Amino acid sequence: MALDVGVQVERSTADQAKLEELAQSVESNPCVLLRNDNLLFGVARQIGSYVIVKTSEGSEIKLKHEEVLCWADSPRHLYRYRVDHRQRGDVPAMLRDARWCIRYGLHDLAAREIVAVNRIAPNSQEVISVEAQLRSAWDQHSQNMASSTPSSASVTEESEKLELADDSRHEK
């Protein structure tokens, strides 16, 4: 089943520019994945047994290497690290990753995790709970974006992805 739902919406040049700027800012937001699953935003470099993170405000944070799992150019790349370092079909880890994605605004990736978990564990109460968290986060995100991005294309696409998740759970 394809996860991406093709929705064709004409956008003004200004809308398209805003969406491209938003996508670029999300894709180029350097961050560090800490052992406790939190993200620390900034550019990291290793010096000896420490990782030094320079934040956008210019301050530097010195962390012991053991506190850091990985660093990358964006939360999306760190999500990939998380997926690559879990066992295949590990439902609790998949749900943790879905919650982590919600926490860091990666709603499309959270929806993918939910769809994948539904294939393994349909009608799970925990999946239903995580899906409700995603819907709530997406509603909040949509309200925040309404004033800055007039186009509703991404809202429609995300809603349709969630409907696919619902449909796959109810088909079982």
Image (spheres, rainbow, N blue to C red):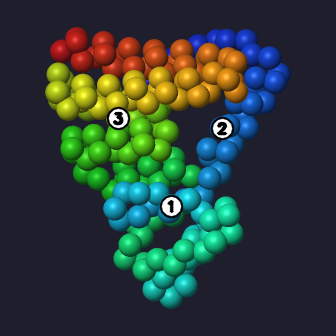
User: Tag 1 or tag 3, which sits nearer the N-term?
Assistant: 1
Label ID, residue 113: 3
Does residue 2 appear in the picture of this structure? no
Q: Quadrant of residue 24?
A: top right
Q: Is residue 165 left or right of residue 72?
A: left
Q: Where is mark 1, residue-wise?
A: 40
Mark 2 nearby-residue class (10 Å; few <14, some 14–19, many ≥20): few
Q: How far separated are the C-alphas under marks 3 and 2?
A: 21 Å
**Is label 2 in a helix, a strand or a loop?**
helix
As drawn, the residue found furthest toward the right would be: 13
Q: Earlier in the sequence, mark 3 or mark 2?
A: 2
Relative to 145, residue 172 above or below: above
Residue tagged 2:
23
- Please indicate whether residue 167 sits to the left or right of residue 120 in the image: right
Type of amino acid at the residue the image marks with label 1: Leu
Determine contact: label 3, label 1, CB under 8 Å: no
Image point (34%, 62%), residue name: 36
Q: Residue 56's image quarter?
A: bottom right
Total marks placed: 3
The x, y position of residue 101, in whole percent, is: 42, 42
Q: Residue at x 17, y 22 (%)?
A: 123
Closer to us: 16 or 84: 16
Q: Is residue 125 left or right of residue 165?
A: left
Structural crowding at the residue carrying mark 3, measured as other residues with C-alpha within 10 Å and reported as few (<14), some (14–19) or many (≥20): many
Left-right relation of 126 to 97: left
Tell me how far mark 1 sits from mark 2, CA to CA: 20 Å
In the rendered image, residue 165, in percent from the top left (x then y), is placed at 33, 20
Residue 157's place in the image compared with 103, above or below, is above
Q: Please identify the quadrant where the N terminus is shown.
A: top left
